[in-house]
């Protein structure tokens, strides 16, 4: 449908205007500040459309540019795109070479005059172990980072090559190395967060995975744990994922955030039920957030303590007690009759 509409004169201008209008509307309410996307489905798209896999990846990069444009129009400050996993090196060598060549041309294209980075003031950061890449690709990526280092409006994190396990491993190594030099250094969750690739970014608000695959594929595993992060899975393949699809996701995210106070669509209070005591007064439970509890173990202890008074009653004991009361009652009646 969109391919057919794109043949009409003025379609591109109309689409660009529509993105700007929608961006202004969505910014009247809550807007995610950090969005992560797993761009999956390029190969399946190529097979279903009977085109070369290389062309499928090419259309995937085209889709990325359109989606990023809408995100930045909506006021998103950080976008993190899963472009290439370390596991992808296991794919056929020819496909890997295609991806490297395509990445060089497409990423440098975004920094050209009048393109995405200049238009929206985007600073590009390459996230991952770039030493795994060929030297010519690494030099291009370094050049792109240098060209956009002074842009301040928004940030584009391109995960290339990346896995979350590798990111956390590097963070732990850095923390251990720092603690060995400074005995007063405390190793906790915040210390590890400060050494992740996304340490300078706001918390992840929204994670989108395309292609109908319901898993995270080793992407931002640490960052998506908080309940404030909404994870959305869509069945569309990445090249088929349009700005309209993103609009619907952003509207639902903004509505849930505004109406429920949480982007997942439920109240942020961990335990908000009110209990009525014997005299009819209402007793509100204290939530873990208000009592300073932050770790999973603390929340577990809180649940255990608050639910300890609701232990299931052993029905066998109740039945035996009832039988004893019946026997005593019968004996009393017999004595009275005598």
Image (cartoon, rainbow, N blue to C red):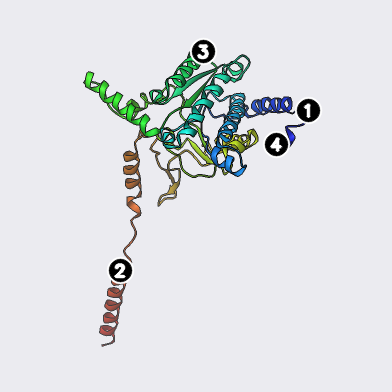
Asked if residue 136 lies left or right of residue 174, the reply is right
Of residue 296 and residue 318, the one placed in the foreground of this image is 296
Q: Which numbered disc, 4 or 2, marks the residue closer to the eye?
A: 4
Residue 259 image point, x, y percent: 57, 37
Q: Earlier in the sequence, mark 4 or mark 3?
A: 4
Secondary structure of residue under mark 2 = helix
Secondary structure of residue under mark 4 = helix
Residue drawn at the location 23% of the way across and 18% of the way down: 181
Answer whether residue 182 is visible to the viewer in this image: no
Residue at the front extreme, as displayed: 94
Disc on res. 2: 4
Answer whether labels 1 and 2 touch (C-beta < 8 Å): no
Measured in 3D between alpha carbons, the distance from the residue under mark 1 to the one under mark 2, in whole angstroms, is 79 Å
Residue 67 image point, x, y percent: 60, 30
Disc on res. 147: 3
Answer whether labels 3 and 2 touch (C-beta < 8 Å): no
- Residue linked to disc 1: 9
Residue drawn at the location 54% of the way across and 26% of the way down: 102
Measured in 3D between alpha carbons, the distance from the residue under mark 4 to the one under mark 1, in whole angstroms, is 13 Å
Q: Residues within 10 Å of mark 4 (few under 14, many from 20)?
A: few
- Residue linked to disc 2: 316
Measured in 3D between alpha carbons, the distance from the residue under mark 1 to the one under mark 3, in whole angstroms, is 34 Å
Of residue 79 and residue 6, the one placed in the foreground of this image is 6
Q: Earlier in the sequence, mark 1 or mark 2?
A: 1
- Quadrant in the picture for the N terminus: top right
């Amino acid at each position: 449908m969109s391919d057919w509409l794109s043949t009409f004169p003025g379609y591109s201008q109309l689409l660009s205007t529509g993105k700007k209008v929608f961006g202004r509307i969505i910014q009247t309410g809550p807007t995610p500040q950090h969005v992560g996307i797993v761009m999956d489905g390029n190969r399946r798209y190529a097979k279903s459309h009977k085109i070369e896999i290389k062309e499928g990846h090419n259309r995937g990069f085209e889709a990325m540019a359109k989606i990023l444009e809408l995100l930045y129009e909506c006021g998103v400050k950080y976008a993190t795109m899963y472009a290439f996993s370390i596991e992808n090196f296991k794919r056929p060598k020819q496909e890997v070479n295609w991806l490297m060549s395509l990445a060089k041309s497409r990423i440098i294209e975004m920094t050209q005059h009048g393109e995405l980075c200049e238009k929206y003031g985007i600073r590009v950061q390459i996230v991952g172990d770039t030493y795994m890449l060929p030297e010519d690709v690494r030099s291009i990526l370094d050049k792109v980072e240098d060209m956009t280092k002074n842009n301040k409006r928004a940030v584009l994190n391109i995960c290339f090559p990346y896995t979350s396990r590798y990111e956390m491993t590097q963070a732990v190594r850095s923390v251990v190395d720092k603690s060995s030099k400074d005995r007063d250094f405390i190793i906790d969750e915040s210390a590890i967060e400060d050494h992740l690739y996304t340490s300078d970014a706001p918390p992840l608000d929204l994670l989108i995975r395309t292609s109908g695959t319901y898993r995270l594929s080793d992407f931002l595993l640490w960052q998506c744990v908080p309940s404030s992060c909404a994870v959305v899975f869509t069945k569309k393949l990445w090249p088929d994922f349009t700005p309209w699809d993103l609009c619907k996701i952003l509207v639902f995210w903004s509505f849930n955030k505004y109406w429920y106070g949480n982007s997942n669509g439920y109240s942020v209070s961990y335990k908000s039920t009110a209990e009525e005591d014997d005299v009819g007064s209402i007793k509100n439970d204290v939530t873990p957030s208000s009592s300073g509890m932050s770790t999973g173990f603390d929340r577990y202890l809180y649940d255990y303590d608050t639910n300890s008074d609701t232990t299931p009653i052993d029905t066998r004991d109740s039945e035996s007690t009832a039988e004893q009361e019946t026997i005593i009652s019968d004996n009393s009646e017999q004595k009275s009759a005598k």
